[in-house]
Amino acid sequence: MKNIFLMTAAVSAVVVSCGTVQSLVQNTFPYTANVLVSTGVPADKEVSSTSTATNVQTWFGGNNNAKIKDVRISDAKISVVSPSGGNLSAIKSVKVYVSSSGTGEKLVASRSNITTDSSSLNLDLNDTGYLDEIVKSSGLTVRTVYELKNQTSSDMNLKIALNFNSVPAN
């Protein structure tokens, strides 16, 4: 009986320590995209802006052998870069899609019915499953689709900040 108890305790300790090590070696890597909202953009019409990743590509881009797996979106945020002191009150909704060469587009984050005067806002994450194929392929692209409540009186620069999590591949 004593041996069974000791064996159970030892197995439990190993399982807990493996989970702890796994969480310690989990990677988080960022991607940012800039979106220009011009004064000529009409209200109540979806507008799309696309940008190609540079910072994610320096991590893994085009390397299908990158030693990562289980890549997921972990955080998404939109913020006003300019004008200084600007806010998101003109934005009605936003959707953020990711894709890469040879992969389909996936909606990773969105927010509708935006009602804030803040200069930044966390977006709702969409459960897209794993994004390994997209992130490890070349040419990671982020497409931002936004809709305005009303036209802006001056150009507005927005920053879309995405964070991805992954774990080391065996």
Image (spheres, helix red, strand yellow):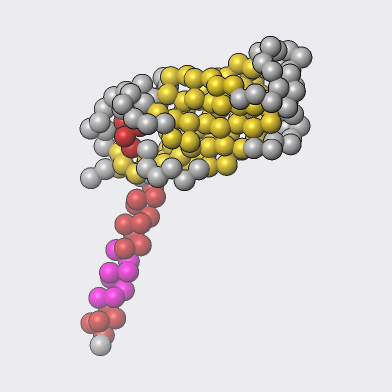
Residue at the far bottom in the pictured view:
1
Q: Which residues make up the magenta segment?
A: 7-14
Above-or-below relation of 73 to 161 = below
Residue 153 on image: x %, y %: 76, 14
Residue 58 on image: x %, y %: 36, 22
Give the quadrant of residue 146: top right
Magenta-span inclusion, residue 80: no
Judged left or right of residue 72, residue 39 is right
Q: Is residue 119 visible?
A: no
Q: In front: 48, or 54?
A: 48
Residue 151 on image: x %, y %: 73, 19
Judged left or right of residue 119, residue 136 is left
Judged left or right of residue 35, residue 72 is left
Which quarter of the rendered picture does the N terminus lie within? Answer: bottom left
- Residue at horizontal 60 percent and vertical 31 percent from the top: 94
From the image, give the main secondary structure of the stretch colored magenta: helix
Above-or-below relation of 98 to 17 = above
- Residue at horizontal 39 percent and vertical 50 percent from the top: 23
Above-or-below relation of 68 to 87 = below
Give the quadrant of residue 66: top left
Which quarter of the rendered picture does the C terminus lie within? Answer: top left
Magenta-span inclusion, residue 12: yes
- Residue at horizontal 26 percent and vertical 43 percent from the top: 169
Q: In front: 107, or 36?
A: 107
Residue 68 on image: x %, y %: 30, 39
Number of numbered discs overlaid on the protein picture: 0
- Residue at horizontal 34 percent and vertical 44 percent from the top: 70
Give the quadrant of residue 67: top left
Q: Is residue 92 visible?
A: yes
Residue at the far front in the pictured view:
45
